[in-house]
Image: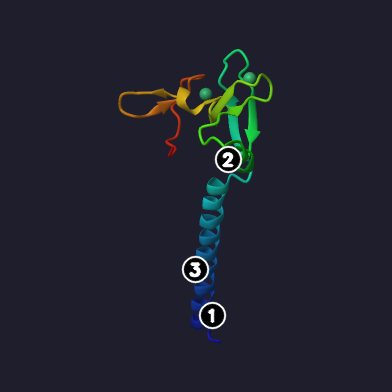
Amino acid sequence: MNPKRAATFALVVLVLGAAGFFATRAVLGSRGTADFPDGIRMICDDPQCGRVFTSTLAEIARLRATNEDAPVPCPACGEPAARARECPNCHGSFAAERVERARDGSTACPLCHNALPHLAG
Ligand SMILES: [Zn+2]
Ligand SMILES: [Zn+2]
């Protein structure tokens, strides 16, 4: 193999490797959000309780087998819980619907009032 061929070969290996890396990451990344491997973070709707806990898709499916609007009960007080979001700034958890919304559509953490990265849903 002459040096030029070797260089081309090395470049091809590099590009294929990078493509494989990004493809794997894209697949793993989308699976991570689609299937909630770590469960779904919930927060008690009662601000006096405010318990944050993790539920799973299987648990929610079981709850909703008979009633598709069935709330997920808080394990501490039994009140309905809501989907929680975690603030990347203060790491506090809050119900997703309690985000502060500016008129331009941007959202902010209700705890520390810092802007939140835009998330679908
Ligand atoms: Zn509670
Ligand atoms: Zn915050």
Pointer 3 residue: 15
Front residue of this view, candidates 36 and 72 = 72
The amino acid at mark 3 is: Val
**Disc 3 to disc 1, how far (Cα)?**
14 Å
Q: Report, in whole angstroms, how far the alpha carbon at label 1 lies from the one at label 2.
A: 61 Å
Question: Are dots 3 and 1 in contact, CB under 8 Å?
Answer: no
Secondary structure state at the residue bearing disc 3: helix
Mark 1 vs mark 2: which is more N-terminal? Answer: 1
Residue 23 relative to residue 50: left or right: left
Disc 2 target residue: 65
In which quadrant is the C terminus drawn? top left
Identified at 54% across, 74% down, the residue is: 10
Residue 84 higher or lower than 31, as above or below: above
**Residues marked 1 and 2 touching at CB (< 8 Å):** no
Give the residue number, with chain letter if any, for mark 1. Answer: 6
- How far from the left and from the top, in percent, is residue 40? 59, 37
Eye-nearest disc, 1 or 2: 2
Give the image quarter of residue 57.
Answer: top right
Q: Residues within 10 Å of mark 1 (few under 14, many from 20)?
A: few
Q: CA distance from mark 3 to mark 2?
A: 48 Å
Q: Is residue 92 visible?
A: no
Q: Secondary structure at mark 2?
A: loop
Please name whichever residue, 35 or 17, is drawn nearer the observer in this view of the structure.
Answer: 35
Quick check: which quadrant has ligand 1? Answer: top right
The quadrant in which the N terminus is found is: bottom right
Rendered residue at 49%/81% (across/down): 4
Point out the residue furthest to the right here: 76
Residue 30 x/y as whole percent: 51, 51
